[in-house]
DNA sequence: GTACTTGTTGAACG
DNA sequence: TCGTTCAACAAGTA
């Protein structure tokens, strides 16, 4: 499930490889996923990639006047293939499905150097849209602070928690309108790192706990980015890199297993319809 | 066959 | 109006 660190990893890889390459063709295989009209698709052919950026969990391919917006949702996956390398990010790929395109390929972008970007999605939740600079700005404005950005201050987090004081701290963290990019995995991991139980009310946190949480979030995200995210693929790039943060997860997906910080077991409940993991001993 | 998984949207509720 | 909860979407995996 791509969250901020996974999307950041993909963006960094793609920025490096797509920059200044001209988009020479688009093949849409699924109208639900590829949400551009024929005219829009035609309009962007021939435009060079200026940059690849991230906002929240969204990938933005800047083509100058227009921007391709890509959201991977839960099972989206981008695979870039050139003569020199094949790299992928997002949902993990089963080895037997490494043929491209495959039955889950929804869109294919082709570039001037014969390389191609395959957009795959098993469940078809993901999408590709086109946005002008103005539309993109408006979209960005609706999202909360970037947890790795300079606007994510201790004061900002305090204000968020004050506004959402009756909600559980876990649900407050994954609300994209307040903090953007944190999903289920990193919410659980950040709360473990800050030693706070996920079902606590946001308003019940002591000042020192808010501070610990504020420090834990970027720390966990940066560590995850360093290890190229949690749900990375079986593919490797030309340098043989295929890191995964899964080895470093303390609570997510470890229900019933021993806690790594004490003798207790990791517990799991549903909070807001989402699986929530924590250690009852380590977290207060 | 059934339960389970999740990011985002939008409807419903109080 | 506002905050909050919940169903829906989708389909592979256990």
Image: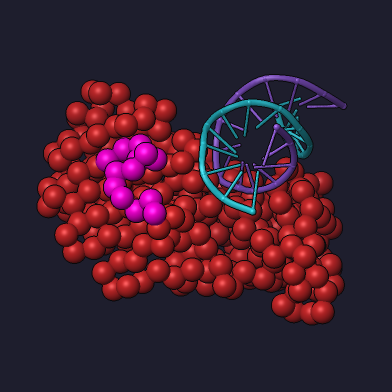
Chain colours: A red, B purple, C cyan
User: Is residue A222 something one can see in this rendering?
Assistant: no
Vertically, is A108 above or below A52?
above
Vertically, is A256 above or below A140?
below
Image point (34%, 66%), residue name = A236
> Residue A148's spot in the image, x, y percent?
51, 62
User: Is residue A97 covered in magenta?
Assistant: yes
Residue range (magenta): A96-108
> Residue A127's spot in the image, x, y percent?
42, 36
Quarter placement of the C terminus of chain A? bottom right
User: Is residue A42 something one can see in this rendering?
Assistant: yes
> Residue A162's spot in the image, x, y percent?
75, 51
Image point (24%, 59%), residue name = A17
> Residue A88's quadrant in the figure?
bottom left
Is A9 situated left or right of B10 in this image? left
Is A33 situated left or right of A28 in this image? right
Tell which of A264 and A10 is nearer to you.
Answer: A264
> Residue A268's quadrant in the figure?
bottom right
Is A234 situated left or right of A248 in this image? left
Image point (29%, 47%), residue name = A100
Image point (82%, 79%), residue name = A263
> Residue A248's spot in the image, x, y percent?
59, 73
Vertically, is A139 above or below A217?
above
Q: Residue most toward the bottom?
A: A262
């Amino acid at each position: 499930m791509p969250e901020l660190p996974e999307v950041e990893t993909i963006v960094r890889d793609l920025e490096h490889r797509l920059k200044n390459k001209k988009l020479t063709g688009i093949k849409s295989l699924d109208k639900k996923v590829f949400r551009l009209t024929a005219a829009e698709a035609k309009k962007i052919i021939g435009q060079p990639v200026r940059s690849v950026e991230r906002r929240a969990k969204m990938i933005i391919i800047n083509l100058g006047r227009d921007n391709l917006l890509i959201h991977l949702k839960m099972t989206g996956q981008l695979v870039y293939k050139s003569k020199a390398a094949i790299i992928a990010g997002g949902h993990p790929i089963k080895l037997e499905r490494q043929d491209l395109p495959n039955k889950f390929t929804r869109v294919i972008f082709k570039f001037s150097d014969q390389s191609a970007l395959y957009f795959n999605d098993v469940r078809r939740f993901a999408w590709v849209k086109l946005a002008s600079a103005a539309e993109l700005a408006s979209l960005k404005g609706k999202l909360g602070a970037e947890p790795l950005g300079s606007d994510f201050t201790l004061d900002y987090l305090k204000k968020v928690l004050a506004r959402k004081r009756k909600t559980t701290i876990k649900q407050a963290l994954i609300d994209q309108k307040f903090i953007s990019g944190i999903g289920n995995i990193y919410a659980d991991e950040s709360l473990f790192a800050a030693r706070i139980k996920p079902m606590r009310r946001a308003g019940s946190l002591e000042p020192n706990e808010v501070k610990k949480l504020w420090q834990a979030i970027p720390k966990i995200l940066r560590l995850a980015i360093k290890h190229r995210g949690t749900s990375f693929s079986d593919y490797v790039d030309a340098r043989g890199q295929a890191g995964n943060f899964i080895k470093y997860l303390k609570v997510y997906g470890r229900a019933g297993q021993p806690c790594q910080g004490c003798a207790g077991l990791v517990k799991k409940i549903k909070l807001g319809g989402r699986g929530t993991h924590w250690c009852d001993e380590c977290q207060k």
